[in-house]
Image (cartoon, grey):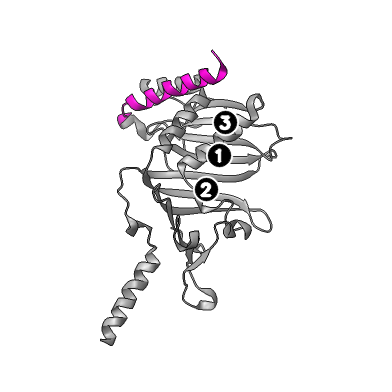
Amino acid sequence: MTRRAARLSGVLLWLLALAVASPLGCASNGKGIEPQAGQVAGMLAAEADTRAELVRADPVAYLHAVAVKCSGLAQYQLTFTRHERRGLFNMLKGPERISCWFRREPFSIRMKWLDPDVKYGESVYIEGQYDNKVRFVPRHGAFGLKPSVTAVDLQTPVIWGEAKRPLTDFGLERLLERTLVPIAEAGEEVVVTYMGLLVLPQSGQVVHHIHLEYPDWRYRVSMQELYVDVKTDLPAGTVLKLSSGLIDAAYFYEEIRTDVSLTNDDFVMDFEREEAVAAGAAAEDVE
């Protein structure tokens, strides 16, 4: 059997396993699991133990299966936490906690920053609308003035150091793509290791921990820690590290809801809604 055929076989087996997997029940809260670097942090139950061993046997096939699952999600909501090394002085920014709405058709992303002390307010992108630009509003206007909606090209926040990637790079599927493409390109040069189960302190999620290491002479970001929720088999987060061990970026995904029915109204910023209400009230006063 060729390597490609073996990989495809592994992915198909994992897709079957994901399709028939039953919930982990009360054990899924992860109580009692103590993360320990470099070793399995403990097992939830016999079911989780079995899952862990399957991932350990072929973590790359498992990641391909997770990618297939993510590609099948038409829409979802989640809470996103972002840390990124960016800006003029290349400092690590964050954490930024953001409520996010994702829709595949038409491709739409809305973000609302949750922390009151950050300068960001909201942003939204709907493919093909507003000249294919990102529309955003800061939390506060300049010089004490009222904030207003601004439309910019997708790459503008990246150019100005406000984000490491364009808004269209957001999403569970894109995270898996950005993980699997380098794995395929690196071939035998990448070492993929299943580290076991642990609990993410940010969310309490019990996750599979997969470590990826690339040759630092070829890759600026040479290490990646990837976390996949044991219960849902959806990404829970990733940490990207430079060869020095410094964090280049970290992204975490909590409270993922895939059972939502998003409409166009979900991709209207709250600021716009408030402005519309105020305009309507002003019009009534004039009448």
Q: Estimate the x, y position of residue 124 in percent, counting from the top left.
A: 44, 59
Q: Residue at x 55, y 45 (%)?
A: 250
Mark seen at residue 178: 1
Which residue is more in the foreground, 46 or 147? Answer: 147
Range drawn in magenta = 1-25
Give the left or right position of residue 170, taking residue 87 as reference.
left
SS under mark 2: helix
- The residue most toward the top is 1
Q: Amino acid at mark 3?
A: His
Please report the residue visible at 57 percent of the width from the left and 55 percent of the height from the top: 163
User: Dot 1: what SS?
Assistant: helix
Name the mark nearer the viewer: 2 or 3: 2
Q: Are marks 1 and 2 in contact (CB under 8 Å)?
A: yes
Image location of residue 180, percent across then percent down: 55, 33
Q: Which residue is mark 3?
A: 211
Mark-to-mark CA distance, 2 and 3: 22 Å
N-terminal of the pair, mark 1 or mark 2, is 2
The residue to which callout 2 is attached is 169
Looking at the image, do the residues carrying marks 2 and 3 touch, with CB atoms under 8 Å apart?
A: no
Q: Residue at x 57, y 59 (%)?
A: 157
Query: Which of the two residues, 128 or 207, is positioned nearer the viewer here?
Result: 128
Q: Residue shown at 41%/34% (left/top)?
A: 69
Quadrant for the C terminus in the image: bottom left
